[in-house]
Image: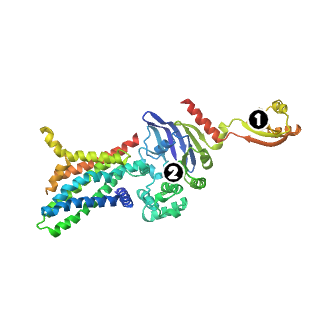
Amino acid sequence: MFNIRIVLGREIQSFFNSPMAYIFLVIFAIVSGYFFTNTFFLFGQSDLRVLFDMIPLVYLFFIPAVSMGLIARENNIGTMETISTMPLNTYEFVIGKFLAGFCLIMLGLLATSIHFITLVSVGTNIDYGAIFSGYLGLALMGATFTSIGIYASSVTENQVVAFIVGVFIVLVFYMLDKTLVFAPQSIVGIIQFLAVDYHLSNISRGVIDSRNIIYFLSMIGFFIYLTIQTLEVRRWK
Amino acid sequence: MIKVTKLSKNYGSVEAVQSISFDLKDGEIVGFLGANGAGKTTTLKMITGYLVPSEGSIKVNDMDIIDDTHEIQKQIGYLPELNPLYTEMRVYEYLEFLAGIRKITGKFFKEALARVVEQCGLKGVVHKNISDCSKGYKQRIGLAAAMIHDPKILILDEPVTGLDPNQIVEIRKLIKSLGKEKLVFMSSHILQEIQATVDRIIIINNGKIVANGTSDELMGDFMGNVLLNMELKGASIESIEHIQAKLPSVKYISLNESKGIQSVQFEYGKNKDPREELFKYAVKNKWSILKMNPRTTNLEDIFRDLTMEGNKDV
C-alpha cells in the first residue's frame, strides 16, 4: 500500500510539474462548460442531464490523452528499467499509475461542480439523488476508461500509438450499445452487457444496481490485470 | 557476493549471453569489458532482476534472483546504461521518490540525502530541475540514485560514457573510494577506464567470457614478445643486420635511415631482456644511442586480440 502511495504521489507531482495537468483541466472545464451552458438556459430544466450526456463524449478522447504517457513514457525514456530493478511489485506500480490518472479525471469532474452550483442557485425542485448517481456513473466510467488507457499505454513505448490504441478500445466499448440493431438476437444480451453506455445510462437514471457496479469494477480489474501481465511478460522475453 | 553459473539469455534466436560463469567477492571492484553488443548490458540486466535468464542461475548472497528478486534488489544499487531520469523532477524529489520505494523516509531520508550529496558532489544542484543539469551532473544524480539506500553491491553500466576527462577522473575516484567497502561491478567498452579503476577484469565477447583476472595476470598470460625501437647514429647497416649473430636473444626486424639517423626495430622474448648487452655492443662499435624504447604488449592489444579472434569464429 505504501509503495502505491509513493508511485501515485510522484505521478501527481509530475502532472503538476509539467503543463499537462493544467491544460487538461482548463480544456475539460471549457468544453464541458460550453456545451452545458449553451443549452441549460434554453431547456429551463433543473437537472444536469445535458452535462452527464456530454461528458462521456469528452472522456472518449481526454482519458486516453491523460493516460497515454503513464507507462509508455517510462518505457520510452528508460525509467522503466530503474523502476523494475527496485523492490517494487508490478501491481503496486500499475495501481499507483492508475490512481494518478483517475485522480486527474476526478479533478476535471470536480471542476464541473460549478455547474451544479449554478443549478442550485437558479433551479427549483432539484433531484439531488439523480445528480449524485450521475456523478457516480461518470466516476466509474472515468475509472474504466483510465484502466483501458493505462493498458494501451503499457503495450507500446510511443505515446501517440498508446493514444490511438486507447481511443480505439474505449470507442469499441462505447459504441457497442449502438450496434445492437445489427446484432443477431442471440447475442444482443451479451453485447448489451459489455457496453459501457448501457451500464452508465442505468446509473445516471438514478438506479444504482449492483450489476452495473460489478460491471465497472470488473472492467477496471480486467484491464489492470492485463497491464500487469503485459509488463511482467516483458521480463521473460 | 555474486555467483553466476552457466548463465544464458536468448532474444528470440539471438544468443546474447551464452553459458557464462563467474564469481564476484565482497569489497572487490570488477570491470566487465567487452565490445558494444558483446552481452555486457544483458548480463547486468539479469543480475539486477530486470530480465529473467533463459538458463543458468544467479545467486546473490546465496539468494536466487528468480525466487528472491526483491530481497536481492534491496541490496543492489544499479546505474543503467543510458542513465534514465525523470527530467521534470527536482533532484531531491527524484531521490526522495526512490528512497521512498526503498522505505527510507523522514529523518532517514535526510541522512541518506546528505550522504549521497556529499559523496557524489551534488551540493549545488539539489534543488534544481534535473532537466537543467549538465550531463556530468545527470550522471552523478544517477549514481546518487543507485546509492541512496547505501547498498552493499553497486552495478554500474558504463558509468563514465559521455563525460569529459575531468568528470571521468572524479567519477573514477568516487568509484575507487566506494570499492573499499562495497562490491562494485562496472561495465565499459573503454579499456583505459577499466584498467584505471578496477581490481579485476572480466572480458566478454560474443556472449562468452574470454578472460578473467587482474590486469597483471592478463598481461602475464597474453603478453608475447617485446618490440624495441631504437634510434642510432654512426652505425653501419651491415653491423645492425648481423646483430643476431652476436646477440642471439635479439631479433632484427627492420631499419630506416634518414639524415644519418638509423631507426631500428628489434624484438625479444619477454623474459630475456637484452638491453644492457645491446648497450655494451653499441659502445663497443662506437654507435651513439639516441633512443631506446621497449614497447610491451598492453591490455589494449590483449583486448583487441581476444575480441577479434572471437569475431573470426562467428
Q: Where is residue A44 in the image (x, y as percent from the top left)?
A: 12, 63
| Most foreground residue, B171 or B46 | B171
Name the residue tied to disc 1: B266
The residue under label 2 is which amino acid type?
A: Ile
Q: Residue A201 carries which label?
A: none
Q: What element carries label 2?
A: strand
Q: Residue at x 16, y 58 (%)?
A: A49
**Residue A19 falls left or right of residue B36:** left
Q: What element carries label 1?
A: strand
Name the residue tied to disc 2: B153
Whether residue B76 is situated above or below residue B307 in the rendered picture: below
Front disc: 1 or 2: 1
Q: Where is residue B61 in the image (x, y as percent from the top left)?
A: 49, 47
Number of dots carrying numbers: 2
* CB contact under 8 Å: marks 1 and 2: no
| Figure quadrant of residue B282 | top right
Whether residue B43 is situated above or below residue A122 in the rendered picture: above
Q: Which residue is drawn at 62% across and 49% down?
A: B196
- Label 2 lies in what chain? B
Q: Earlier in the sequence, mark 1 or mark 2?
A: 2
Q: Position of residue B292 (x, y in %)?
A: 78, 42
The residue under label 1 is which amino acid type?
A: Phe
